[in-house]
Image (cartoon, rainbow, N blue to C red):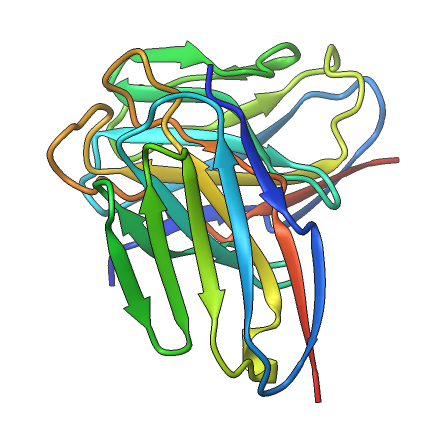
Amino acid sequence: DGGITQSPKYLFRKEGQNVTLSCEQNLNHDAMYWYRQDPGQGLRLIYYSQIVNDFQKGDIAEGYSVSREKKESFPLTVTSAQKNPTAFYLCASSIEGSDYSGANVLTFGAGSRLTVL
Amino acid sequence: ELKVEQNPLFLSMQEGKNYTIYCNYSTTSDRLYWYRQDPGKSLESLFVLLSNGAVKQEGRLMASLDTKARLSTLHITAAVHDLSATYFCAGPPGGGATNKLIFGTGTLLAVQP
């Protein structure tokens, strides 16, 4: 079955450490996204990529980095520069990065919950 | 850029009752999405509304879009406990052909027996 796989599901980090969250999709989607969700809040966009080897900052990119070396993969690194990284991180993908004619619905992974100790 | 406001933020309702969740957005948008999230889980797509006057229905949920009023509604008919979840509306930010979405803060729906 096609879908998005995020790992790890739970991650604990000490202050000052970088951590990388994995996101892999086998949907053959061009676009991929990382969102952050804090308790009782909506989703905020961290980074997105519409094509391999290209990505753009979202609304809250500071303290995060990404790469898009393969169409299937879009890992997110939470760096020590991110002051409040404890959150639920959601990866998503869509058929196209830009589309006027179709629905182009975002498909989400199961999420990774990061806790800083 | 698009701002999305949902109300109410929390809704406690009895089984069998009807209610409506409202989603107001700030700029012109030709599409609106509704998602459902169960506690601790990911988001599941419910509806995509692609034009003014669009109406979609699935079971006890019906969504509509009024682009002139910049308003979408999610109507719940004869609620059941299984509908308890957080519901988000979202729209593209506008000004360009991108599908990155701006999400509302969500409406936490609790259906009581």
Q: Residue at x 60, y 51 (%)?
A: A9
Q: Residue at x 66, y 12 (%)?
A: A63
Residue occupying the far front of the picture: B69
Front residue (pair A115, A70): A115
Q: Residue at x 80, y 16 (%)?
A: A83
**Position of B71 compared to A38: left or right?**
left
Q: Would you place residue B81 above or below residue A48 in this image?
A: below
Front residue (pair B107, B18): B18
Residue B43 coordinates in the image, percent (x, y): 48, 53
Residue A51 coordinates in the image, percent (x, y): 23, 19
- Picture quadrant of residue B41: bottom right
Q: Would you place residue B26 above or below residue B89 in this image?
A: above
Front residue (pair A68, B43): B43
**Position of A108 compared to B42: left or right?**
left
Q: Would you place residue B108 above or below residue B89 in this image?
A: below
Residue B84 coordinates in the image, percent (x, y): 61, 72
- Picture quadrant of residue A20: top right
Residue B10 coordinates in the image, percent (x, y): 72, 57
**Position of A115 compared to B74: left or right?**
right
Q: Evaluate whether residue B53 shows in this view.
A: yes
Q: Residue at x 59, y 43 (%)?
A: B6
Q: Evaluate whether residue A108 shows in this view.
A: no
